[in-house]
Image: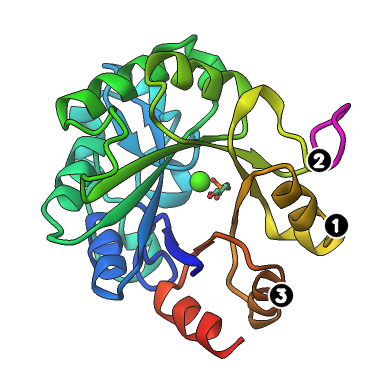
């Protein structure tokens, strides 16, 4: 079965990375939630994609130049046209999935960790430990997976928390490696849908090398046909309800 993972929450319907977008994704039956994380100036992990605040809030400047208290005074919803919303911390999101009352996968993407040394990874693993989620226990209803485009960041995660699965995100094929091979030992490959369209042989090659395949960001009907044809393990989508229907039909 292909898992449906809500990209930044149900982010087509509600502003990305807000509690409402994640609650809607759970209500729509998403198997998992995807979340980007960044550090604030006071080293709190917040659920935000962009380095800067302008696109998704009424603030200005870099996320990392603001404390969590300052971000809490901003509106992260009105840009979307569906009303105001507050910044979401990873701690709050972990609370939401813990209280969901059913199995939920949480796919956490560390954004540009090279700018902070290993601090993003250290803070992330410490927080997961506080929630009892860093030990990779298959009997827990909440299962955390860490994703990154940066192989180094994933290597750090595996050193800090060896039981946590990691996804090597791929925008392009990794240079210097045979097709189907991943750098630094991630077991799961995360190719973008554009890469899959250009290189449809990639999924069988990754599978032959023993990797699971999680594809992002899949929204268009033709792309659901493509991922179904190859039988991928997870689709990361802005529209979880539509994705479920499209996978059933394809
Ligand atoms: O799920 C992976 C995907 O989210 C990576 O791209 O830019 O949406 O973080 P981006
Ligand atoms: Ca992401």
Is 176 inside the magenta-drawn segment? yes
- Residue found at x 51% / y 86%: 248
Q: Secondary structure at mark 1?
A: loop
Task: Pinpoint residue 110: horizontal percent, then vertical percent.
Answer: 47, 31
Give residue 32's quadrant in the image.
bottom left
Q: Is residue 227 visible?
A: yes
Pointer 1 or 2: first along the chain: 2
Other residues around mark 1 within 10 Å, as few (<14) / some (14–19) / many (≥20): few
The answer to which of 65 and 135 lies nearer the viewer is 135
Most common SS among magenta residues: loop
Q: Is residue 195 visible?
A: no
Q: Residue tagged by mark 2?
A: 173
Can you say which quadrant of the picture contains the C terminus? bottom right
How far is mark 3 from mark 1, CA to CA? Answer: 14 Å
Q: Bounds of the magenta span?
A: 173-179
The answer to whether residue 145 is left or right of residue 29 is right
The answer to whether residue 42 is left or right of residue 5 is left
Task: Pinpoint residue 161: horizontal percent, then vertical percent.
Answer: 37, 20
Give residue 90's quadrant in the image.
top left
How far is mark 3 from mark 2, CA to CA? Answer: 21 Å
Q: Residue tagged by mark 3?
A: 229
Disc 1 to disc 2: CB gap under 8 Å: yes
Task: Pinpoint residue 1: horizontal percent, then vertical percent.
Answer: 49, 69
Q: Residue tagged by mark 1?
A: 199
Pointer 3 or 2: first along the chain: 2
Other residues around mark 3 within 10 Å, as few (<14) / some (14–19) / many (≥20): few
């Amino acid at each position: 079965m292909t898992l449906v993972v809500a990209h930044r929450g149900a982010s087509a319907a509600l502003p990305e990375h807000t509690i409402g977008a994640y609650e809607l994704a759970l209500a729509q039956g998403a198997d998992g939630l995807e979340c980007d994380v960044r550090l604030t100036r006071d080293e709190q992990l917040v659920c935000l994609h962009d380095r800067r605040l302008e696109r998704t809030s009424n603030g200005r400047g870099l996320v990392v130049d603001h404390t969590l208290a300052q971000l809490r005074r901003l509106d992260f919803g009105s840009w979307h046209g569906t009303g105001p919303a507050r910044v979401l911390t990873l701690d709050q999101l972990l609370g939401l999935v813990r209280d969901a009352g059913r199995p939920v996968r949480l796919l956490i993407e560390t954004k540009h960790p090279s700018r902070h040394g290993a601090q993003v990874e250290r803070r992330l693993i410490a927080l997961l430990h506080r929630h009892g989620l860093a030990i990779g226990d298959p009997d827990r209803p909440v299962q955390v997976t860490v994703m990154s485009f940066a192989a180094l960041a994933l290597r750090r995660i595996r050193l800090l928390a060896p039981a946590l699965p990691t996804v090597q995100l791929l925008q392009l094929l990794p240079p210097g490696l045979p097709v189907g091979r991943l750098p630094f030992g991630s077991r799961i490959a995360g190719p973008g849908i554009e890469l899959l369209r250009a290189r449809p042989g990639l999924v069988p090659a990754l599978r032959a090398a023993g990797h699971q395949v999680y594809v992002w960001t899949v929204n268009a009907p033709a792309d659901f046909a493509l991922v179904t044809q190859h039988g991928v393990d997870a689709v990361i989508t802005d529209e979880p309800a539509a994705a479920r229907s499209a996978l059933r039909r394809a």
